[in-house]
Image (cartoon, rainbow, N blue to C red):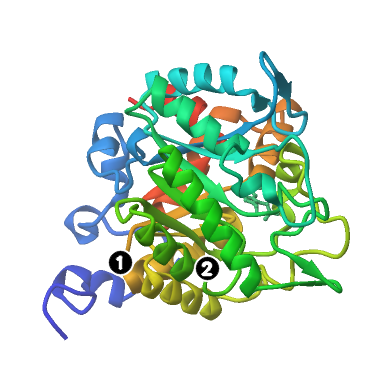
Amino acid sequence: MASGGFDSEGFRHLRQGFHSPAEGAPPEGSAMAIRLRRLRRLPALRAMVRETRLSREQLVYPLFVCPGTGVRQEIASMPGCARLSIDLLVEECRAVHGLGIPAVLLFGLPETKDAVGSGAYAEDAIVPRAIAAIKDAVPELLVWADVCLCEYTDHGHCGLLHGGEVLNDPTVGLLARAAVAYANAGADVVAPSDMMDGRVGAIRGALDRAGFSHTAICSYAAKYASAFYGPFREAADCAPQSGDRRGYQMDPANSDEAIREVGLDLAEGADIVMVKPALAYLDVVRRVKDIYRAPTAAYNVSGEYAMLHAAAQNGWIDHDRAMMETLTSIARAGADIIVSYHAKDAVRLLS
Ligand code: PBG
């Protein structure tokens, strides 16, 4: 074994196990050369050796855009979050940019829904209009656009539905159309969250053919069929009217499969790969980062946000401390980018 490891002289006392209860208190003096508490004694020392530093540059703030003007509809299960009409959304984006948050992630609520989710990809659809308005008012703010059909279909599934099945390949073509519409409106990043097979490659091809080879793709590469999306489905009005999403989103028990999903999306041209949800899947975030060393995002989802707020409102946990501990844990697991409804509250606490 190389010198300096557990076999080296410095660790002799550990190998000899002098912490065993039989020996009582550790011996005096240099015999216990290593005391990890020394660097925990003072705030400045703790800060110097801190391994994970959260920074505002890594945060993405999700926003919901709805029709109308002057509309602000609070989302009961997500305190502090609201559906905003485009005019108020633009004001919110100015504030977000002013706080130093570099990016927003947009979700749309269309005027009307139909079986094929036209509200996702029509040229005058709500999300392209919102993107153009934001880019006009706050050009430096990065605009990420979620690409999926579930907010736009009357049945609430993420793709075309036929006989109870969500069709893969016909859906992919529509997702690619949506991605092009968002890129055309000025989106910097398109983020497919539907979990159809092959959609990253199709979106990359469609973007390139339409002249948007510079538009980046953040794929929700490992997206699990999770109970933690509950509040979002109220916010975006996209709960499936029949069945569930287990036929396309991943089984929470699987981790090797996440590695395959991420590998495929990177091969198809994803620039950033995302794991979602974050907290119950931090092991997956770590594996993805260790294996691919690619830009990795994690989505701190609506249910995670709602739980923290609910407990804090009851006085059961300290909101700010729990929030920062949560976000730090996601970064420590290996996420370069954190999508979180906490972003605005968190940047106020960052130095
Ligand atoms: C759309 C989509 C969902 C979320 C992001 N994009 C919902 C779902 O898959 O059911 C969840 C986000 C959150 O819970 O914060 N497919």
Is 72 left or right of 298, judged from the image as shown? Answer: right
Q: Which residue is mark 1?
A: 293
Residue 124's quadrant in the figure? top right
318 versus 154 height, above or below: above
Q: Residue 209 or 141: which is nearer the viewer?
A: 209
Label of residue 239 in the image: none
The N terminus - image quarter? bottom left
Q: CA distance from mark 1 to mark 2?
A: 22 Å
Which mark lies nearer to you, 1 or 2?
A: 2
Residue at 40% x, 23% y: name it.
136
The C terminus - image quarter? top left
Question: Residue 152 location in percent, x, y?
Answer: 72, 47
256 versus 80 height, above or below: below
- How packed is label 1: few (under 14 Cα within 10 Å), some, or many (20 or more)? few
Amino acid found under the numbered disc labelled 2 = Arg
| Secondary structure beneath label 2 | helix
Is 151 left or right of 175, judged from the image as shown? Answer: right
Q: Which residue is mark 2?
A: 199
Residue at 71% x, 38% y: name it.
110
Question: Residue 249 location in percent, x, y?
Answer: 66, 67
User: Closer to the N terminus: mark 1 or mark 2?
Assistant: 2
